[in-house]
Amino acid sequence: MSSDDTPKGSYFYPNTSDDPDRTDVLRNKFGIRSHSELRTEEYRAAAFRMAEIAEGDGPQGRFDKEHLKAVHGHIFQDVYEWAGHTRNQSPIVDGERMEPIGGLSKGDTSFLPGSRIDMGLDEALKPIRDPEVLRASTPEQFAERAGQVMADLNYVHPFREGNGRAQEAFIAELGREYGHDVDFAVITRPRMIEASIETTNDPSSPTMKHVIEDAIDPNRREALRAAFSDLEQRGENPYEHNVRTARPGEEITGQLLGHDDRAASVVTDDGIVAVDRADLPERLPDDEA
């Protein structure tokens, strides 16, 4: 490597203010220097590109690591020069070559060291390597494999930013390829964050499988949307809450939020749980006498 190619750049703009909103802002194609403004523009641009993928206009591939990189690159192509590059690479940003990112963490969660990302991606994608197995999969079997892949990809955390959205688009595309409609619109951010943390701390946890089951099962999706409606009627934004469906045989304790003939929403210590109306007493506290 020549001296001109030696990595020396930073993913961040130089800090010129003590304002937290303007500190450590990622370099971006908009030239935006505040987190709040960048967040708005990033989500707008990324949502447009994710819609393209959902409509079949995204990158095609074999659902391997190169395909995942292409998905990330498509989603964030309007925002970051390094879109599609994993954090062990040295892309050129604003004319300077970036240092590979070795360690990455969020809160108390540490992710796979950058030097092991290629190996980590190969290992994480093993459950979906055989197309014949996926082609014959039931929804539950697909949820098992896709949930494991999402959990492992989250630990690998291959990209500097945008891992969650790239993973969701990748898994939704995988579902479409093999006949499963995976709708992450019913999965709230607090729910996904909790599942990501839990599976990183305990790889044997079925939490991410449950996320995929809720996103893939039409009845569970309907129950979640009913819970969203119950929250909205109370003036709450459902996407700010951890909302999930009850698992078979699970005992739920909490306060009734709302119900209809098919589902009920219960407020528990851990969030909102949507349950089958048939599993509750025939008469509920808010029923008319």
Image (cartoon, rainbow, N blue to C red):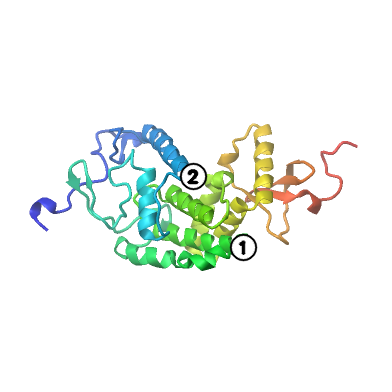
Q: Which of marks 2 and 1 is nearer the N terminus?
A: 2
255 up-or-down from 155: above or below: above
Residue displayed at 45% across by 66% down: 129
Element on which disc 2 rests = helix
Residue displayed at 17% across by 50% down: 8
The picture places residue 42, in percent across and down from the top left corner, at 39, 37
Give the camera-side residue of 228 and 165. Answer: 165
The picture places residue 99, in percent across and down from the top left corner, at 22, 53
Q: Is residue 110 left or right of residue 114?
A: right
Q: Name the residue under label 1.
A: 138
Residue farthest along the right direction in this orientation: 289
Q: Are marks 2 and 1 in contact (CB under 8 Å)?
A: no
Give the camera-side residue of 255 and 215. Answer: 215
Real-space Cα distance between discs 2 and 1? 22 Å
229 up-or-down from 242: above or below: above
The picture places residue 266, in percent across and down from the top left corner, at 71, 46
Q: In this view, does 65 lie to the left or right of 97?
A: right
Q: Mark 2 points at which residue?
A: 54
Residue 130 at least partly seen: yes
Element on which disc 1 rests = loop
User: Mark 2 belongs to which amino acid?
Assistant: Ala
Residue 111 at least partly seen: no
User: Mark 1 belongs to which amino acid?
Assistant: Thr
In the rendered image, the quadrant that contains the C terminus is top right
